[in-house]
Image: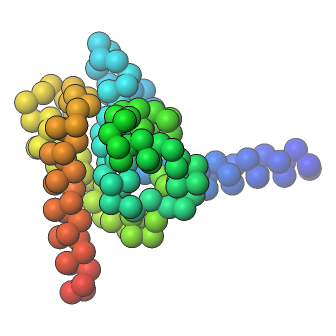
């Protein structure tokens, strides 16, 4: 009976974690990922979004407590988007975001618009989204587009 109870708690923790997860690099490099690219390329798109979250202060207290130094280093462009994502094992979850961040991410990222924008603005001339370079110029391009989408999202919320 006790082993069954422990197994139920383990399952409950697993499902609680899954409900928080928005994206994870592992699901990309274990899936339809080009064999000849470095695994780090599976982290880039997640890191760019997380970087935008940081630059717009839409992260949670938990994320700030756990990553204060990385937040500082990212804002000062001392670590790249890929490294930022790698620090969190390629994980992007609701627990890293504040309330507004969660709501916007649910609409934009989980709604598929982020991938659409990433492909149109960064990956259109590449074989896949995983071929996009982790560069500050690419980050600025997608960050500008995310900011536009964020403003549209905020405007739509005011009138609904």
- Which percent across, then down, holds residue 38? 34, 18
Residue 43 appears left or right of 154: right
At 20% from the left and 69% from the top, the residue drawn is: 151
If the image is split into quadrants, where does the C terminus sit? bottom left
At 23% from the left and 32% from the top, the residue drawn is: 135
Q: Residue furthest left?
A: 125
Residue 53 appears left or right of 9: left
Q: Residue furthest right?
A: 1
> Looking at the image, can residue 156 be seen?
yes
Residue 40 appears left or right of 138: right
Give the image's coloring scheme: rainbow
Residue 56 appears left or right of 126: right
Compared to residue 121, the image places residue 42 above or below, namely: above
> Looking at the image, can residue 18 be seen?
no
At 38% from the left and 22% from the top, the residue drawn is: 39
- Which percent across, then down, holds residue 42? 35, 30
At 37% from the left and 35% from the top, the residue drawn is: 78
- Which percent across, then down, holds residue 6? 83, 48
Q: Quadrant of residue 152?
A: bottom left
Q: As rendered, which of 61 and 75 lies closer to the eye? A: 75
Q: As rendered, which of 10 and 120 lies closer to the eye? A: 120
């Amino acid at each position: 009976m006790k082993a069954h109870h422990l197994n139920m708690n383990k399952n409950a923790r697993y499902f609680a974690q899954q409900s928080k997860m928005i994206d994870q690099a592992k699901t990309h490099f274990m899936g339809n990922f080009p064999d000849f690219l470095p695994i780090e390329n599976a982290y880039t798109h997640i890191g760019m979004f997380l970087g935008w979250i940081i630059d717009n202060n839409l992260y949670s207290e938990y994320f700030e407590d756990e990553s204060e130094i990385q937040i500082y280093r990212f804002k000062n462009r001392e670590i790249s988007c890929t490294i930022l994502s790698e620090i969190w094992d390629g994980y992007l979850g609701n627990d890293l975001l504040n309330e507004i961040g969660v709501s916007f991410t649910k609409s934009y990222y989980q709604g598929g618009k982020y991938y659409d924008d990433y492909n149109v603005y960064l990956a259109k001339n590449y074989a896949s989204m995983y071929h996009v370079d982790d560069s500050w110029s690419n980050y600025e391009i997608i960050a500008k587009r995310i900011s536009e989408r964020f403003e549209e999202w905020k405007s739509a919320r005011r009138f609904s």
